[in-house]
Image (cartoon, grey):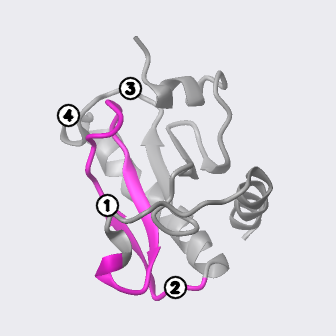
């Protein structure tokens, strides 16, 4: 069965796309720990991050770097934090989170609530940055 991320890649489930190429997709997390929290995923469905083929693993961070730079130009923060957890969805992914301290990456904190319009506007700003 395809993961929810594969269904997003196929266009079966909508997302707030902030970057895409032939191999990767970046979109806003719908349950963000901070405003602007994004996910970067390979279009290849592989469960565990370090099981990705070497060429995909080698390509995901340069792609994420471009996304992170656009995020940082739009979202006030000290830096963009990176986390690879991989327990929530069985599809390799990287979290990009605007942070001012390590505590901003605490996944146990209450999630930020945003309307669909707020997500859409933020995604547009990041894509256009």
Q: Of marks 3 and 4, which one's residue comes earlier in the chain?
A: 3
Numbered mark located on residue 77 in the image: 2
Query: Taking 63 as reference, is 9 left or right?
Result: right
**Distance in Å between CA atoms under marks 2 and 1:** 20 Å
- Give the class, few, some or many, for how many residues have Cα within 10 Å of label 4's Cα (few <14, many ≥20): few
Of the pair 102 and 84, the residue shown nearer to us: 102
Quadrant, the C terminus: bottom right
Which residue in the rendered view is the most extreme toward the left?
Answer: 50
Depth check, mark 3 against mark 1: the one in front is 1
In percent of width and height, residue 126 lies at 69, 65
Quadrant that contains the N terminus: top left
Are circles 2 and 1 on residues that touch, CB within 8 Å? no
The percent position of residue 5, horizontal first and vertical second, equals 48, 31
Range shown magenta: 76-103
- The numbered dot on residue 108 is 1
Decide: is 113 above or below 23.
below
Q: Earlier in the sequence, mark 4 or mark 1?
A: 4
Instruction: Give the farthest residue toward the top.
Output: 1
């Amino acid at each position: 069965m395809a993961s929810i991320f594969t269904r997003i890649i196929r266009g079966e489930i909508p997302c707030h796309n902030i970057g895409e190429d032939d191999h990767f997709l970046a979109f806003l997390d719908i349950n963000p720990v901070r405003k602007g929290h994004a996910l970067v995923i390979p279009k290849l469905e592989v469960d565990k991050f370090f099981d990705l083929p070497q060429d995909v693993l080698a390509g995901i961070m340069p792609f994420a770097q471009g996304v992170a730079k656009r995020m940082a130009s739009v979202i006030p923060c000290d830096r963009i934090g990176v986390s690879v957890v991989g327990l929530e969805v069985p599809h390799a992914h990287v979290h990009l989170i605007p942070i001012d301290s390590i505590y901003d990456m605490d996944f146990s904190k209450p999630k930020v609530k945003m309307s669909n319009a707020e997500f859409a506007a933020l995604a547009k700003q990041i894509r256009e940055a």
